[in-house]
Image (cartoon, rainbow, N blue to C red):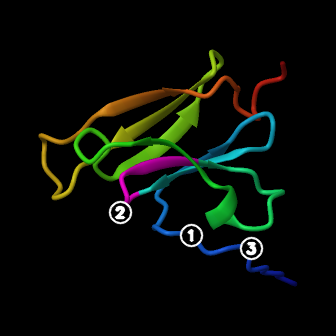
Amino acid sequence: MCVFLLFFSDKPSPTDGLTVDKNGFMYMTEVTQNVMSRWDPSAPDFRTSRVVLAQDNTTMNWPDTVGIDDLGYLWATTRGMPLDRVNNFIIRIPIGAVSYLYDY
């Protein structure tokens, strides 16, 4: 079995969830920055081509799981830090694109 690993780019924060839209853009959480970002993998460097879609230190505390619906929204859950039952939210961000899983 051959495995090829290629270093692509470093980034400013760990990621806990990511997804890709029909256009090939990658959406990811940046958990220690409380950020949802978009990146074009064809760009040479994440740090210079990253687009911050949303950042909030209250409602986006530790963004986690992500998904894209058929209406052009990116959805994310947050789990709050420290882990508790208070800082858990569902976030919806308009992105104007659908998931790579959709046929249209």
Q: Nearer the viewer, residue 53 or 98?
A: 53
Q: Residues within 10 Å of mark 2 (few under 14, many from 20)?
A: some
Q: Secondary structure at mark 3?
A: loop
The span shown in magenta is 31-37
Which mark, residue 11? Answer: 1
Report which residue position mark 2 lands on.
32
The C terminus - image quarter: top right
Spatial distance from mark 3 to mark 1, Cα to Cα? Answer: 10 Å
Tell whether 93 sits left or right of 18. Answer: left
> At 55% from the left edge and 48% from the top edge, which residue is drawn?
37
Given residues 9 and 67, the one toward you in this image is 9
Which residue is located at x 48 percent, y 52 percent? 29
Which residue is at the far top? Answer: 71
Mark found first going from the N terminus, 2 or 3: 3
Q: Residue at x 79, y 33 (%)?
A: 22
Picture layout, residue 46 above or below residue 58: below
Q: Residue at x 62, y 15 (%)?
A: 71
**Left or right of residue 67: residue 87:** left
Residue identified by numbered label 3: 8
* Kind of residue indicated by mark 3: Phe
Mark 2–mark 3 distance (CA, rounded to whole Å): 21 Å
**Residue 103: percent from the left, percent from the top?**
84, 22
Give the residue type at disc 1.
Lys
